[in-house]
Amino acid sequence: MILQSAWRSPSNIALVKYWGKHGIQLPRNPSLSFTLQESHTTMKMVVDIHATSPSLVVMYDGQPRPQFEPKIKSFFTRIHSYFPWLSKAAVTIDSVNTFPYGAGIASSASAMSAMALCLTEIDGLIHDNQNPVLPLRASFVSTIARMGSGSAARSVFPLAALWGATPSVENSSDEYAIPWNDQIDSIYKSFHDTILIISSTEKSVSSTAGHELMNDLVYADVRYSEAHKNVACLTEIMRTSDHIDAFIALCESEALQLHALMMSGPQPYILIEPNTIAVIRKLWQFRNETSIPVCFTLDAGPNVHVLYPHDYHVDVMTFIKSELQQLCSNGLFIEDCTGAGPQKIEST
Ligand code: PMV
């Protein structure tokens, strides 16, 4: 029996960062993210559940990509108890991203959430489960996505998501993310994220290794309690549009803390580049001179996510093109914003 499913799923950018994990991608602290609109993965999965022998074929944009297979095979092993049919199935996956590889956008978040959506839908077809995958099975999808890549747990929801158990948020869980779109003011529902590509070379230290290094960091417990505090603050700040200055201060503090953690372990490393700092300095100067509420965040890499409300789009883009674009690798930036979350693609 041949079954298939196709989904488009977005990447996300954390405002309060997940950094440090245990078990099967369980977070050491809660995190809160914006779901992106333009940066996404489109994935089609075809499964023969009665194949003569199990197999996995992975393609990117129609071309074979055997180098992705080991990671997906170990993910399938991890989720075997949820989808026992996987061990006997012939699976073909073909995906494509809207953003260039190495652009510093979390492709694992969009790809692993897309994969969790496809698997959950196919599982529903096998078991004749009539419930739509989203929103009814969102917690399950988020749990599966988390096992592929922690941050992928948050990509399942529109606009904003919160992942990780924390006393200030009822129903928060380490196992899966929860939607956070209803709790934020409309100003945050149309926020822009212009992603400045400072370097597109591969990271010298992977996120997996970075999480691991938190286990040896003397500041780790302080960091985890800061993250709990910052989630509690940010959830309050984002309920209205009145405290954008506090939003800016918290986002930038979180971004720099993430990189400070990398720089302060027993095996320190630096992922930001001179142009990351140059961008930040120019952005601070622009904000001081204009009072436009624009700020930055960083992922685990040198690229800068410039965040600002929709009303300032023209002013900020004019500034980016005249002052910041020259600091980007090949002048590259990606215009993104908060987005509607995953979309099912009907088969033709
Ligand atoms: O999901 P991972 O294991 O790639 O970790 C992502 C960690 C950060 O992107 C740096 C922060 C976050 O919360 O997304």
Image: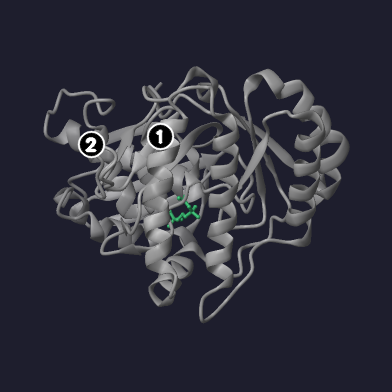
Q: Residue at x 50, y 22 (%)?
A: 189
Q: Quadrant of residue 345?
A: top left
Q: Nearer the viewer, residue 253 or 108?
A: 253
SS at badge 2: loop
Q: Amino acid at mark 1?
A: Thr
Which quadrant of the figure contains the C terminus? top left
Which quadrant of the figure contains the N terminus? top left
Cα–Cα gap, marks 1 and 2: 12 Å
Q: Residue at x 42, y 55 (%)?
A: 226
Looking at the image, residue 149 sits to the left or right of residue 119; the answer is right
Q: Quadrant of residue 318?
A: top right
Q: Amino acid at mark 2?
A: Glu
Label pair 1/2, CB-CB below 8 angstroms: no
Q: Which residue is mark 1?
A: 235
Q: Position of residue 58 (x, y in %)?
A: 43, 52
Q: Residue at x 57, y 50 (%)?
A: 253
Q: Position of residue 122 (x, y in %)?
A: 24, 36
SS at badge 1: helix
Q: Nearer the viewer, residue 11 or 93?
A: 11
Q: Quadrant of residue 162?
A: top left
Task: Specify whether residue 70 is in view.
Answer: no
Q: Which residue is mark 2?
A: 170
Looking at the image, residue 325 sits to the left or right of residue 255; the answer is right
Q: Nearer the viewer, residue 318 or 123?
A: 318
Query: 10 Å neighbourhood of mark 2: few (<14), some, or many (≥20)?
Result: few
Q: Residue at x 44, y 74 (%)?
A: 217
Q: Position of residue 42 (x, y in %)?
A: 47, 35
Mark 2 residue CB less than 8 A from any atom of ligand 1: no
Q: Position of residue 127 (x, y in %)?
A: 11, 34
Task: Specify whether residue 348 is in view.
Answer: yes
